[in-house]
Image (cartoon, rainbow, N blue to C red):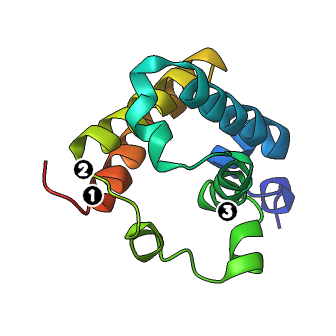
Amino acid sequence: MSSTDLQAPVTTPTPFERLGGEPGVRTLVDRFYDLMDLEPAYARLREVHGSTLDDARDKLFWFLCGWLGGPNHYIERFGHPRLRARHLPFPIASVERDQWLACMYQAMEEVQVDPELRARLERSFFDTADWMRNRAG
């Protein structure tokens, strides 16, 4: 057996780890919802969320932790995410999709997500957000 056989395998950090674990994901989610609440450009998206964003903040944080390769907080609380089914009661057309994406992209930029990771997440977020549309337009 050579000394290289005894070395630990090289593992690539998950997006969750690259964001800084739970504190990093929480920072991203909080900035996302702060922007949604403050920026007029996201007004239509904000309308869909009701009077308070507290529940949405927690649910997105829990979901993203698992989706990014960390703990499955959302699944432990609610079971399978069933994203499209859970979002059917909310009108989501291209305008809401585009505002959600712009808000998330701005949040990632402001919390200084690594550019390579950010590009990867932008593609994944677009695919998911586009799939969530449930209204024409």
- Mark 1 → mark 2, Cα distance in angstroms: 5 Å
Q: Return the residue found at the far front.
A: 51
Three-letter amino acid code at disc 1?
A: Arg
Q: Earlier in the sequence, mark 1 or mark 2?
A: 2
Q: Is residue 84 left or right of residue 27?
A: left
User: Looking at the rendering, in which quadrant would you find the N terminus?
Assistant: bottom right
The circle on residue 93 is 2
Image: 112 above or below 13: above
Q: Amino acid at mark 3?
A: Gly
Between 131 and 136, the one lying in front of the other is: 136
Q: Which residue was labeled with disc 1?
A: 133
**How much space separates mark 3 and mark 1, taking CA atoms?**
22 Å
- State yes or no: discs 1 and 2 in contact (Cβ < 8 Å): yes
Assign a secondary structure to mark 2.
loop
Q: Which residue is mark 3?
A: 66
Quarter of the image for residue 2 reads bottom right
Q: Is residue 48 above or below residue 104?
A: below
Which amino acid, by three-letter code, is at mark 2? Ala
* Residue 99 at x, y percent in the picture: 37, 33
Q: Earlier in the sequence, mark 3 or mark 2?
A: 3
Give the SS element for disc 3: helix
Q: Is disc 1 placed on a helix, strand or loop?
A: loop
Horizontal side of 102 relative to 111 (left or right) equals left
